[in-house]
Amino acid sequence: MSGYTPPSREDDPIHTIRTIARVAQMLIELRDEYVKRPRADLLVQIGQRLTDLEALHDELRHRMANSALREKQ
């Protein structure tokens, strides 16, 4: 894999999907850290990442709707 990413529109859902993947990876890392050493601050961070995922879910719905409208045109 070369690392090259073809250009995309700023409102393309791919940007949101990439961000979702990054947040998901953060959640996995936070989970691993919490399992090794449970701490209240880690729970707060996990909660914040879940809130971020909710917002990204809403953003993805919006981008999907816009994408579907463009395809119909």
Image (cartoon, grey):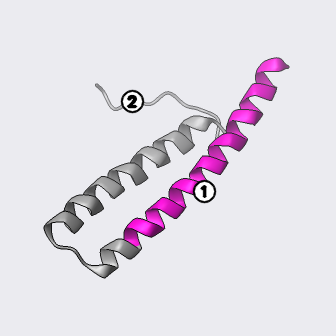
Q: Which tag is nearer the camera, tag 2 or tag 1? A: 1
Of 11 and 51, the residue lying toward us? 51
Percent coordinates x, y for residue 64 in the rendering: 69, 34
**Rendered residue at 72%/43% (across/down):** 62
Q: How many marks?
A: 2
Q: Where is residue 52 in the image (x, y as percent from the top left)?
A: 52, 60
Residue at the limit of the structure toward the right, as seen here: 73
* Residue range highlighted in magenta: 45-73
Q: Residue furthest top?
A: 72
Marks 2 and 1, the one that precedes in the sequence: 2
Q: Which amino acid does label 1 sit on?
A: Ala
Q: Going by the image, does 45 lie left or right of 1?
A: right
Q: What element carries label 1?
A: helix
How much space separates mark 2 and mark 1, taking CA atoms? 28 Å
The disc placed on residue 55 is 1
**Does 36 sit above or below residue 71?**
below
At horizontal 47% and vertical 42% (from top left) the residue drawn is 18
Image quarter where the N terminus lies is top left
- Element under label 2? loop
Dot 2: within a 10 Å radius of its alpha carbon, few (fewer than 14), some, or many (20 or more) residues?
A: few
Which residue in the protein does label 2 denote? 4
- Quarter of image, res 69: top right
x and y percentages locating residue 2 in the rendered image: 30, 27
Crowdedness near tag 1: few (<14), some (14–19) or many (≥20) residues, C-alpha within 10 Å: few
Question: Residue drawn at (68%, 41%), measured in percent from left and top?
Answer: 61
Q: In this view, does 36 lie to the left or right of 17?
A: left
